[in-house]
């Protein structure tokens, strides 16, 4: 188990250090297909969701069917497949409010 933690730590550090070099690939990372099929299933997103998601909708106060909505994508990129996104602004919304936000 400690070996797995060390490997994850090394990969996270490597991704963070290479972040400027990965910037040319950020355009690839921002495609909808990459976002849905890779990023939304990644360890980094699961940890981000666990750390940042609240127990209620920030617009209407509902406690059912909650989603985490990105207000900006400043911390998003290839490195966020491993490292949790603690930089981007996000808010917890219910499914109805989340749908309304994307239609604006």
Image (cartoon, helix red, strand yellow):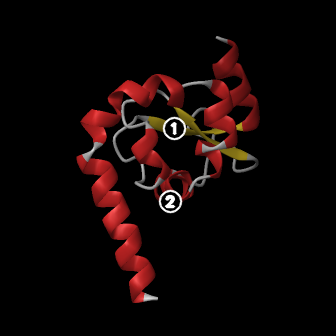
Query: For the residues carrying marks 1 and 2, which lies nearer the camera in this image?
Result: 2
Residue 28 visible: yes
Classify 101 as above or below 29: above
Question: Is tag 1's residue or tag 2's residue first in the polypeptide sequence?
Answer: 2
* Residue 88 pos. (x, y %): 39, 36
Q: Name, please, the residue furthest toward the bottom.
A: 1
* Residue 41 pos. (x, y %): 65, 51
* Residue 50 pos. (x, y %): 53, 60
Q: Residue at x 54, y 53 (%)?
A: 49
Q: Residue at x 66, y 19 (%)?
A: 102
Task: Measure the C-alpha gap from mark 1 to mark 2.
Answer: 15 Å
* Residue 23 pos. (x, y %): 34, 29
**Circle 1 crowding by C-alpha within 10 Å: few under 14, some 14–19, many from 20:** some
**Foreground residue, 97 or 24?**
24
Q: Residue at x 37, y 30 (%)?
A: 74
| Residue hosting label 2 | 47
Q: Residue at x 52, y 31 (%)?
A: 29
Picture quadrant where residue 83 is located: bottom left
Confirm or deny contact between disc 1 and disc 2 (CB under 8 A). Answer: no
SS of the residue under disc 2: helix
**Foreground residue, 100 or 50?**
50
**Foreground residue, 81 or 59?**
81
**Foreground residue, 68 or 2?**
2
Classify 13 as above or below 75: below
| Residue hosting label 1 | 91
Q: Is residue 38 left or right of residue 88?
A: right
Q: Is residue 14 left or right of residue 104?
A: left
Q: Is residue 14 left or right of residue 82?
A: left
Image label count? 2
Picture quadrant where residue 36 is located: top right
**Circle 2 crowding by C-alpha within 10 Å: few under 14, some 14–19, many from 20:** some
């Amino acid at each position: 188990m400690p070996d797995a933690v060390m490997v994850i730590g090394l990969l996270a550090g490597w991704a963070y250090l290479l972040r400027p070099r990965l910037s040319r690939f950020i355009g690839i990372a921002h495609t909808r297909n990459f976002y849905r099929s890779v990023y939304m299933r990644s360890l980094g997103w699961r940890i981000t969701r666990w750390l940042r998601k609240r127990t209620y909708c920030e617009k209407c106060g509902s406690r059912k069917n909650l989603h985490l909505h990105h207000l900006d994508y400043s911390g998003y990129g290839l490195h966020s497949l491993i490292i949790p996104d603690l930089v981007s602004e996000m808010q917890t919304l219910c499914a109805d409010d989340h749908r309304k936000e994307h239609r604006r």
